[in-house]
Image (cartoon, grey):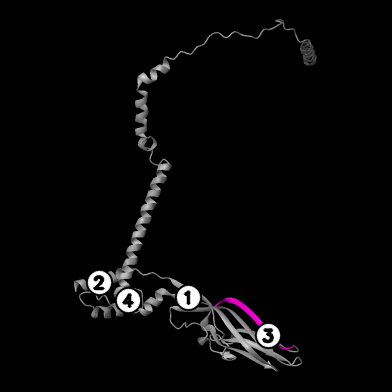
């Protein structure tokens, strides 16, 4: 019983991951069998709770055969299965026109397929249509988490019916787990995925710590002498400087020299006064005397 309880604890601790698988597609010709059709036979099955189908486009093509003088309308439409009326409706007016082949495309916001009721192509007036083709653009989402719960309620404790399924599982559980048990296989896979995720997180944390340490060193967060100076290299330099016989010859080196005699000779040692400058100075003196005399007179 102890072994059984340990298996239960492991099952409860196993992780689950919620994700969806999205598929985009175009239906086959809805009007291949006639001028009316049931959308349940056209779109992918959305009956399971984990499947959602939405429509966001429609295209149709047909050939109109009529007398140019007659009046006729062609309606292409789908009933609104929830609110009544039509979720899609388009009318082509052929009154007074020759017959021809027409093709049209429509795009609109995604609408849940549960609103799309029966479709039809209806001729109102004189004329008939042939070679009808109607297709729908859709998006199908499959919720993997809900699908797992629907197929195996024991896949996750959050699944509806998990408690009842677990009780039933324990009633039928042997002392040793049955390796042929499909849920045992799912548990093994979940455990392996959990171990891989833990290892990846540990590696990421280790890398982040190393990056932080490198950044601290670069930014001077640890201003130790050993971090800033290569002690080994400094010891080598000091040892080289201590070798007196190697350095001493550089201090005793004699550089040959002598007296350098000036070669510039002035031909005229007398420098004449600048008479223009003297005249300017005299003018400035007279000007200041005239200005000053104005104040002295007062």
Q: Give the image quarter of residue 74.
A: bottom right
Q: Look at the numbered discs 3 and 1 and tell me whether their residues touch, using CB distance below 8 Å.
A: no
Q: Which mark is residue 242?
A: none
The stretch drawn in magenta includes residue 95: no
Q: CA distance from mark 2 to mark 3?
A: 68 Å
Q: Residue at x 33, y 65 (%)?
A: 194
Q: Residue at x 34, y 33 (%)?
A: 232
Q: Does 198 sit left or right of 46 as displayed?
A: left
The residue lying toward the viewer, choosing from 183 and 277, is 183
User: Magenta segment, which residues?
Assistant: 98-111
The secondary structure making up most of the magenta span is strand
Q: Which mark is residue 154?
A: 4
Residue 32 in the image: above or below residue 187? below
Q: Position of residue 37 (x, y in %)?
A: 55, 89
Q: CA distance from mark 3 to mark 1?
A: 35 Å
Which quadrant of the rendered structure holds the C terminus?
A: top right
Q: Look at the numbered discs 4 and 3 and tell me whether their residues touch, using CB distance below 8 Å.
A: no
Q: Within 10 Å of the Cα at label 3, are there few (<14), some (14-19), or many (20+) other Cα atoms?
A: few
Mark 3 = which residue?
A: 101
Q: CA distance from mark 1 to mark 4?
A: 23 Å
Q: Residue at x 37, y 24 (%)?
A: 241
Q: Earlier in the sequence, mark 1 or mark 2?
A: 2
Mark 2 = which residue?
A: 7
Q: Position of residue 124 (x, y in %)?
A: 67, 92
Q: CA distance from mark 1 to mark 2?
A: 34 Å
Mark 1 = which residue?
A: 141
């Amino acid at each position: 019983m102890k072994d059984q309880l340990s298996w239960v604890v492991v099952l409860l601790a196993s992780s689950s991951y919620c994700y969806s698988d999205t598929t985009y597609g175009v239906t086959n010709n809805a009007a291949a069998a006639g001028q009316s059709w049931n959308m349940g036979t056209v779109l992918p099955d959305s009956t399971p709770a984990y499947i959602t189908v939405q429509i966001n486009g429609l295209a149709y093509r047909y050939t109109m055969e009529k007398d140019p003088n007659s009046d006729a309308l062609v309606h292409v439409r789908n009933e609104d299965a929830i609110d009544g009326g039509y979720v899609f409706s388009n009318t082509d007016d052929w009154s007074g026109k020759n017959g021809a082949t027409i093709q049209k495309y429509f795009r609109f916001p995604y609408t849940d397929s549960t609103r799309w009721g029966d479709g039809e192509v209806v001729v109102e007036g004189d004329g008939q249509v042939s070679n009808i083709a109607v297709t729908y653009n859709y998006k199908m989402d499959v919720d993997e988490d809900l699908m797992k719960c629907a197929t195996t309620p024991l896949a996750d404790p959050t699944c509806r019916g998990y408690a009842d399924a677990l009780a039933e599982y324990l009633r039928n559980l042997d002392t040793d787990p049955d390796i042929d048990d499909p849920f045992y296989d799912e548990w093994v896979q979940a455990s392996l995925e959990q171990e891989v995720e833990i290892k990846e997180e540990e590696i990421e944390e280790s890398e982040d710590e190393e990056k932080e340490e490198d950044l601290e060193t670069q930014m001077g967060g640890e201003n130790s002498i050993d971090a800033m100076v290569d002690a080994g290299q400094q010891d080598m330099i000091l040892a080289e400087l201590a070798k007196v016989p190697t350095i001493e010859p550089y201090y005793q080196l004699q550089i040959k020299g002598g007296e350098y005699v000036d070669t510039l000779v002035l031909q005229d040692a007398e420098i004449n006064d600048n008479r223009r400058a003297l005249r300017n100075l005299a003018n400035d003196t007279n000007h200041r005397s005239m200005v000053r005399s104005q104040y002295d007179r007062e």
